[in-house]
Image (cartoon, rainbow, N blue to C red):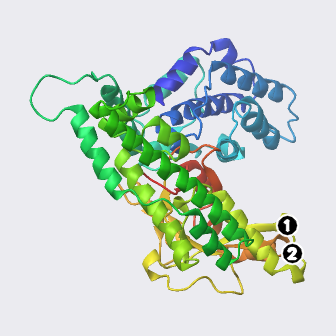
């Protein structure tokens, strides 16, 4: 923060500082500079900072300052600063013009709402404890002296984040360094003693083939679905998931079988098999499998997930619909929620429900997955889902609300969530109900994987909170289906 503000104010001349005589000019100039440094510094925290790392630069700062200057030149002294206009220009146009993700836009607008108001001009205003506006500064040198007095190392709280965010940043940095070291290691077998690369990969291939689940038999799957009702939305979804899982299982089986033959010299080592050999030795996921499946931290995690996903699908086919669903275990979780909406709409046709007016609502229960013994009550419908982890916050099970995460605890498992569909006509009542009393509701995004992009976004879950929703937006709080 200190270095960023110094760099910004080294580019500000004395003439610029004195260009406007109004008392609002200097505090606003400093506030925009502080916002400029904050949006740049948050990038180092990865998805907790910004879902997409944007290239904010000096041009954004210059154009923002020019706008503030023009706005103050046209200012009506009786009305004062038009805050809604100023926030819109900063959050939606000057900085917001670069932002392509809706949730990043929400974060940026939260910063402008919290930092740009009549409060900004009060003596007691501060961005964070110890980070105030130099109201008495007359020259650029005075401002730089104020900046010089700032702490050398910033707490993530300055940027609105939890102190745990620093652990995330250091972990990501270490992982990146180790990944680079692994990538530049020589790939050829050495002449020393011990197991060769080929031998260790062959042993791994044998182990994986032993554990790999059997192929789905098409006519058996079809007859089971026929019994359950082939045209039910949930069963159509199940068939699509089984088809995709079968493609992954077939690809893994054929690659491993061919790889063993290629290592023995029976067949030629193709480019895909060479890639599979290198990746398996480095515990990474071969390119061919990744194309058909899902990203994961290591090959071990990926293969365990394959077995768990298959277990959920084969159990659903053989023993009927489960009481609760592991949301992480689906290729298309959005399709799962849409099928649930269709199901609820069909059962409420007599009440005049239509699919385009039906939206998702949720209650976070106090049960963990072991406590669920029956499906959700029939009058509400919906599904129980589990396997979600809170990133950037903790969970109070007794009060069923979101809280600050404990020190050094990066991910908190969320209890079972009851997700159900409601007609938007009744949505006002249901939205009002879960908050209750002094609690507010935070719309928490749910992502499939730790990469927070639109590709991995599933839906928004409403979580109860004592703090205002802005607090959690600045924290970058989200729910992940997979925290590895």
* Residue 298 in sight here: no
Residue 184 percent across, percent down from the top left: 32, 22
x 54%, y 55%: residue: 245
x 75%, y 24%: residue: 21
Image height check: is 52 above or below 110?
above
Residue 145 percent across, percent down from the top left: 47, 23
Quote the CA–CA distance across marks 2 and 1: 7 Å
Local crowd size for mark 2, using a 10 Å CA cut-off: few (<14), some (14–19), many (≥20): some
Give residue 20's quadrant in the image. top right
Q: Pick whichever, 472 or 385, lies toward us.
A: 385
Residue 443 horizontal side relative to residue 46, left or right: right
Q: Are the residues flagged by discs 2 and 1 in contact, CB closer than 8 Å?
A: yes
Q: Secondary structure at mark 2?
A: loop
Question: Disc number at residue 252?
Answer: none
Residue 112 percent across, percent down from the top left: 68, 42
Residue 320 percent across, percent down from the top left: 57, 78
Residue behind mark 1: 357
x 86%, y 42%: residue: 79
Local crowd size for mark 1, using a 10 Å CA cut-off: few (<14), some (14–19), many (≥20): few
Q: Pick whichever, 140 or 7, lies toward us.
A: 7
Image height check: is 428 above or below 271?
below
* Residue 88 in sight here: yes
Total residue callouts: 2
x 21%, y 24%: residue: 189
Residue 363 horizontal side relative to residue 406, left or right: right
Residue behind mark 2: 353
Give residue 340's quadrant in the image. bottom right
Image height check: is 166 above or below 303?
above
Q: Secondary structure at mark 1?
A: helix
Give residue 422's quadrant in the image. bottom right
């Amino acid at each position: 923060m200190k270095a960023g503000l110094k760099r910004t104010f080294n580019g500000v001349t004395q003439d610029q500082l004195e260009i406007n005589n109004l008392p609002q000019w200097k505090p606003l100039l400093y506030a925009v500079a502080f916002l400029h440094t904050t949006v740049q510094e948050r990038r180092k925290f990865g998805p907790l900072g910004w879902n997409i790392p944007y290239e904010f630069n000096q041009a954004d700062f210059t154009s923002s300052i020019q706008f503030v200057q023009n706005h103050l030149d046209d200012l009506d002294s009786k009305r004062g600063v038009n805050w809604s206009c100023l926030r819109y220009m900063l959050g939606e146009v000057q900085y917001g013009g670069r932002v392509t993700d809706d949730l990043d836009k929400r974060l940026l607008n939260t910063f402008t709402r919290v930092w740009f108001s009549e409060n900004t001009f009060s003596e007691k205003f501060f961005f964070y404890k110890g980070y105030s506006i130099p109201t008495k500064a007359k020259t650029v040198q005075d401002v730089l002296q104020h900046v010089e007095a700032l702490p050398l190392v910033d707490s993530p709280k300055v940027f609105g984040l939890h102190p745990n965010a620093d652990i995330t940043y250091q972990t990501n940095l270490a992982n990146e360094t180790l990944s680079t070291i692994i990538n530049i290691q020589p790939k050829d077998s050495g002449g020393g003693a011990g197991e060769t690369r080929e031998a260790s990969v062959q042993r791994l291939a044998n182990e994986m083939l032993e554990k790999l689940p059997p192929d789905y038999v098409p006519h058996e799957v079809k007859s089971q679905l026929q019994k359950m009702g082939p045209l039910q939305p949930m069963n159509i979804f199940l068939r699509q998931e089984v088809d995709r899982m079968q493609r992954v299982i077939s690809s893994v089986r054929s690659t491993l079988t061919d790889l063993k033959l290629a290592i023995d010299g029976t067949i030629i080592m193709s480019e895909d098999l060479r890639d599979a050999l290198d990746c398996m030795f480095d515990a990474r996921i071969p390119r061919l499998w990744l194309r058909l499946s899902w990203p994961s931290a290591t090959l071990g995690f990926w293969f365990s997930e394959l077995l768990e996903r298959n277990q959920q699908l084969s159990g659903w086919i053989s023993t009927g619909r489960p009481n609760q669903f592991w949301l992480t275990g689906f290729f298309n979780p959005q399709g799962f929620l849409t099928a649930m909406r269709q199901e609820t709409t069909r059962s409420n046709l007599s009440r005049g429900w239509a699919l385009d007016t039906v939206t998702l609502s949720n209650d976070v229960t106090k049960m963990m997955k072991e406590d669920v013994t029956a499906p959700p009550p029939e009058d509400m419908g919906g599904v129980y889902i589990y396997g979600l982890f809170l990133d950037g916050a903790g969970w109070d099970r007794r009060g069923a609300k979101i809280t600050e995460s404990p020190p050094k605890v990066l991910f908190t498992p969320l209890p079972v969530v009851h997700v159900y569909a409601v007609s938007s006509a009744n949505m006002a009542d249901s939205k009002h109900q879960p908050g209750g009393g002094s609690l507010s509701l935070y719309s928490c995004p749910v992502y499939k994987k730790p990469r927070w992009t639109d590709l991995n976004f599933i839906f928004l879950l409403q979580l109860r909170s004592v703090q205002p929703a802005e607090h959690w937006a600045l924290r970058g709080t989200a729910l992940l289906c997979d925290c590895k």
